[in-house]
Amino acid sequence: MLETKLQTELQNKVNKKIAPLFAKYDMDVNGLQSGMKWKPIVLIIGNYSSGKSTLINEIIGADVQRTGQAPTDDAFTIITNEGSEKPKEVPGSTLVNDENLPFIKFKQYGEKLTSHLCLRNIDSPDFKDMAIIDSPGMLDATTEKDRGYDYMEVLGEFAKMADLIVLMFDPHKAGTIKETYSAIRDTLPEKSGEDRIIFVMSRIDECDNISDLVRSYGTLCWNMSQMTGRKDIPHIYLTYAPQLANAIKNSEWWPQERDELKKKIFAAPTLRLNHILEDVDRQVHELQILSEAMSELSRRSRKLFTKVAEVTVGLALGLFVFGDVLTNSILSLPSQTLISSLREGTFSFGNLILPLIFLCGTFVLGFVVFDRIVFRNLIKNTLADSSTLVKLDNEYRRNLWKKMATSATELIKNITVKDIWHGHASNLAKINRFLEGDLKKFYEKLRP
């Protein structure tokens, strides 16, 4: 399969050319690599009564997930077909320690998360090349302390991995859940592209009539416009589970887009390579702007170093030649200066001792002045407005810098004088060659 071959080729290129640079700039190389591992992923999210588990069971064709209108499952459950030779259920503690899976990064969230994370191995040919992740229902009152881990941050990491995100609502809570608001407003836009998210209002058969449905749909649209800050609302699939719906209401006029929704879900694997390229592209551009900032800071530092060095060398040579003359006139030491010894032909190594002390002392003083005063002032001024390090000539780069400014600040705070010679310009050139050469070739291979 062409996509699988290209995915392997891309992974090898990234690991060889780009991954080492991520480590140099304190960026998460696991986040870069995990996106290229394993299978296409569909993430199902929504409040606890939105019909997530019912939809998953219908897609699988078996009652894998418990269903109900109260919270029935508070775990992130990864459902896939790993083969009959693998265990039927794999606990989170195993998943976060398996380097062949993309879940190692979740280890940092501690035992509270790993105890609410598992993989279910199902006997379904449709899931050999894809996985569905069922997530804990979003709630209004739950806090990070109650869950024991940062739910929104974890959800964002899963969203970053997903090739398709299905965000489900029910007509009784049409977008009013606090965590749903946070997900739509902040987490999903930051971690995933809009094209990967589809919105579903399920259980519409529970509306008493079409008028009730219209009111619920209008409420959801209004709430979404408030959450997204946009007037144009994306398509919202209207659906219900036929096997659970009230038979009296199952008439032809009752809206139902479930088959189209399932087609979207099973089409997720075809989007995989495009999404991998988008993720690599985005993360490498983040690396690029950091490298660009550090390269410019190094350039400015070296420029100042050159100026200080020029003054230091001039002063050092002057003191090497005339320093002992000055001390002789003031302290009558040494008894014979370097110049007089050369003129009188009585030069000996002893005549070099004081000039060499002046020479070395001046170089040491020059370095101290650069390190403690000039360089520190540069860092202080740069931290006051680090955006001057990069060109922010379009909206994309401004948004990119806004996201990476904190990382740049940490790098700037920790830079030392020796770091200004570490080849940031060379690193930047490597990154640019990868973006302009290797990555473009992969995009071209995907064109029809």
Image (cartoon, rainbow, N blue to C red):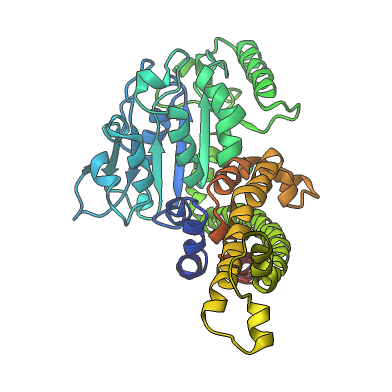
Extreme residue in the bottom direction? 345
Residue 251 image position (x, y, % from top left): 55, 22
Is 314 on the left-hand or right-hand side of 132? Answer: right
Up-down relation of residue 444 to residue 136 (above or below)? below
Q: Nearer the viewer, residue 229 or 165?
A: 229
At 51% from the left edge and 69% from the top edge, which residue is drawn?
17
Residue at position x 46%, y 43% in the image: 42
Furthest residue in direction right, as rendered: 393
Tell me if I can see residue 329 in this picture: yes
For the image, the number of numbered tags is 0
Image coords of residue 124 (percent x, y): 31, 49
Q: Quadrant of the C terminus?
A: bottom right
**Vertical placement of residue 279 versus 91, above or below:** below
Say whether residue 292 is left or right of residue 334.
right
Q: x, y percentage for residue 365?
A: 60, 58
State the residue in front, 20 or 127. Answer: 20
- The picture quadrant where one finds residue 333 is bottom right
- Residue 423 appearing in the image: no
Q: Nearer the viewer, residue 11 or 274?
A: 11
Q: In the image, residue 367 lies at what x, y percent?
A: 60, 59
